[in-house]
Amino acid sequence: MGKIRTSKGAVIYMVGIRDFWQVAHKLNLTLIQGRPYHNEYLEAVLSSRLLHVNHLEVGDTFPAANDINLTIVGAYSAWLSLMNNMIICSDTALQKILGRPGKTNMLFLTLHDPLESDKIIERINKKYPNLRALPSRDLASQIGTLTSLTKMLDVIALIALGVAIIILMSTFVMATYMRMRQIGILSAIGWPQPMIVVLFVIESAFLSIAGGLVGLTLSAGILIALRTFFPNIAFYLPETLSQHVMLMSLLMSIVVGAVAAILPAYQAVRKPIVEALRDE
Amino acid sequence: MNKSSQILLEATHLKKTYDGGLVQAVHDVSITLEKGKLYVLSGRSGCGKSTLLHLLGTLDTPDSGTIHFEGKAFESMDSLTRFRRENLGFIFQFHHLLPLLSLRENVETALVFCHKFSDTEHRERVDSILMDVGLEDRMHQYANLVSGGERQRAAIARALVTHPKLILADEPTGNVDSITAKAIMEILRNRIQDEESTVLVATHDPLVRAYADTIFYMEDGHIQRVENAH
């Protein structure tokens, strides 16, 4: 894999692989025009967007290096727009373009048991110090564009999380206010105010844990379903939910639930008991 | 025993207004409750009975006037919450039970922070009080799944279980039939005899007056007349 810069300064990723169909299957690419490249020739398949932007057509040539032109033999399209910025050719052609004959910089291994990946990665890294093995889920962090993309996705996820927290909090606030009369009853029969607040906070925390567990179960199910029914994107997904993610999710559920209950419960116990008892 | 040692609660010149003074709910009311007696606050709806009950039960604060309980002013008490817990029992017209708890659990809520009894005594007391109000077979039913009469009996049990010195009942027979109303008043009457509690019932139900030692007739926030039954 490598990248070249066009005369206009645009960065184009190049993938050199012996079998076009292998990469097409892996990255969910569809050959929409022409044919795959022959390994012996300086031929390439370009994304349809790249062709369009550069005013090229199948049959034209593409100046990949100073003295090397690739013949465009096909065009592909990809569902992931990030993949629409690639030139795919044979590994020998790419080695020639990059001036590194016989060299390769990336190998994809498909494991029989994905759960063993961490152990295998550790063994490879120990046995071959010149290689660096990493799980496919970490691949994105190694590629600049993908890093930006994942950072953007992180921001979107954070916004979604913030919205979820606000909705959850408002739900708890409403739920506590709707039980104003119960708070009034407990106050009237002599429950200490701090204990009433604690009671509501504990209850909210338990409800949040239950919600968190349901969310994690759903996430695990969706992950399995995605990996099973959409093998092309499985490449970008983790094998399982990590313990860290599960722990953080549950912790966040508890904290959000508890914090959301404190303020309304505190306000409710401060309300005159007579008013609380009259609350509908 | 001299008269002052018999006095449980003494309120003088109580005043309570709402809506910035526009509504005078209680106006210059003075009232004395002696130990071991059943008092009735009688009057039409809106005459100030419930407000007076709330003031005497520390659920609300008067604009002016003082209330002494066993000679001690409410203002000088460290914690009104603890005072309520240890000395008062409330029975409300709409029972105010916690719907998602069983009748027994509702009764037990009053004992959670009450340190008058040991754990064993707690259990015995709950069993005994539920039997007294006739709920021994229904105690494990959820509060929202039983009849109005059973809810009111459970509310009475909750008020009595801590052995309060003063029981304040706001229209306890307001939402029950006459047979249940009589049963409720019998329970309260017996409680006075068994545990020497004092009971103050706010009601407009004439049936309740028959059980009273003293009746306070209220009108427009005043006590117009006091009638001793015996």
Image (cartoon, grey):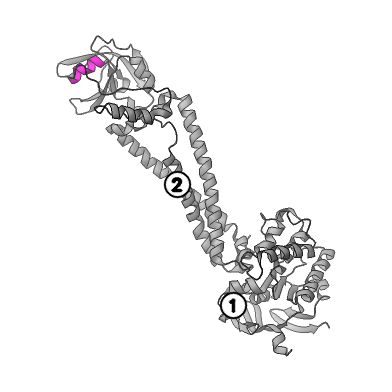
Above or below, A127 against A243 in this view is above
Which residue lies at the image location 71% right of the left edge and 59% below the top edge? Answer: B104
Three-letter residue code for mark 2: Val
**Which residues make up the magenta segment?**
A91-100
Could you say which quadrant of the image residue A3 lies in?
top left
Image x and y of residue A258, in percent: 50, 54
| Residue B189 within the segment the image draws in magenta | no
Q: How far across and how far down the image is residue B105, in percent? A: 68, 58
Q: How far apart are marks 1 and 2 (CA)?
A: 45 Å
Q: Classify residue A28 as left or right of residue B11.
A: left
Visible residue check, residue B110: no
Do the residues bearing badges 1 and 2 touch, measured as CB atoms within 8 Å? no
Assess disc 1: are there few (<14), some (14-19) or many (≥20) residues with their C-alpha within 10 Å of its C-alpha. few
Disc 1 residue type (three-letter): Gly
Q: Look at mark 2 in the image and give the residue it sits on.
A: A163
Q: Is residue A57 left or right of residue A197?
A: left
Which residue is located at x 66 percent, y 79 percent? B26
Which residue lies at the image location 78% right of the left edge and 67% below the top edge? B173
Majority secondary structure in the magenta region: helix
Foreground residue, A234 or B220? A234
In terms of secondary structure, where does tag 1 sit? helix
> From the viewer's perspective, is B121 left or right of A107?
right
Residue at 78 percent across and 59 percent down: it is B136
Give the x, y percent position of residue A98. 19, 20
